Amino acid sequence: MKRAVFPGSFDPITIGHEAIINRALPLFDEIVLAIGVNSNKSYFFTLEERISVLEKCFEGQPKISIASYSGLTTEYCKTIKASHILRGLRTAADFEFERTIALMNKKMAPELETIFLISEPEHSAISSTVVRDILKNGGDISDFVPTNFPKK
């Protein structure tokens, strides 16, 4: 079984995340949307809210599961017997950042492969950080999040 982990905070999920996940579905038997929990980081949405949103976004998609984890992504991947880590790239800066992480992950877990998918041009400016900032300031985020994203 080809199982991929798409790790992230998903705080919130964006249409860019959604597009990468949907494009990756034909490549894997299962994609685990793995919400990384970092006790040193403060989140806008609770873990429960993020899980609920992901469940709604991918309702009826049997190849997607949702989980949370703490610690190293490589250790989580080993625990669930994942063979791949899935990452989306929006910009050259994303590539440099993700490349460094992928090389470190490869050193720690040589059996894991990282797969990068480049975002569609129309999604390249959309980031969770910017979407959160718009939301915190009372702006409309409906163009940047999946259609069934709940109002907060």
Image (tube, helix red, strand yellow):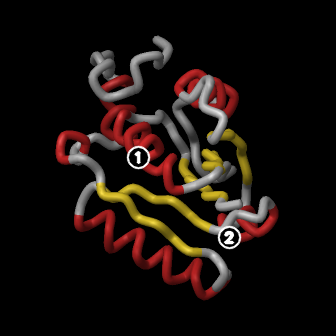
- Residue at x 50% of width, y 37% of height: 11
- Relative image position of residue 76 (x, y in whole percent): 74, 62
Secondary structure beneath disc 2?
helix
Location of mark 2 (residue) = 74
Asked where in the image residue 45 lies, by quadrant, the reply is: top right
When the figure is inspected, residue 137 is found, relative to residue 18, above or below; the finding is: above
- Residue at x 69% of width, y 50% of height: 39
Q: Name the outermost residue toward the top.
A: 151
* Nearer-N-terminus badge (1/2): 1
Location of mark 1 (residue) = 23
- Relative image position of residue 145 (x, y in whole percent): 38, 27
Secondary structure beneath disc 1?
helix
Tell me the amino acid under the disc marked 2: Thr
Q: Name the outermost residue toward the right.
A: 79
On the picture, is 30 further left or further right than 19? right
- Relative image position of residue 67 (x, y in whole percent): 71, 43
- Whole-angstrom CA distance, mark 1 to mark 2, is 23 Å
- Residue at x 56% of width, y 53% of height: 6
When the figure is inspected, residue 14 is found, relative to residue 72, above or below; the finding is: above
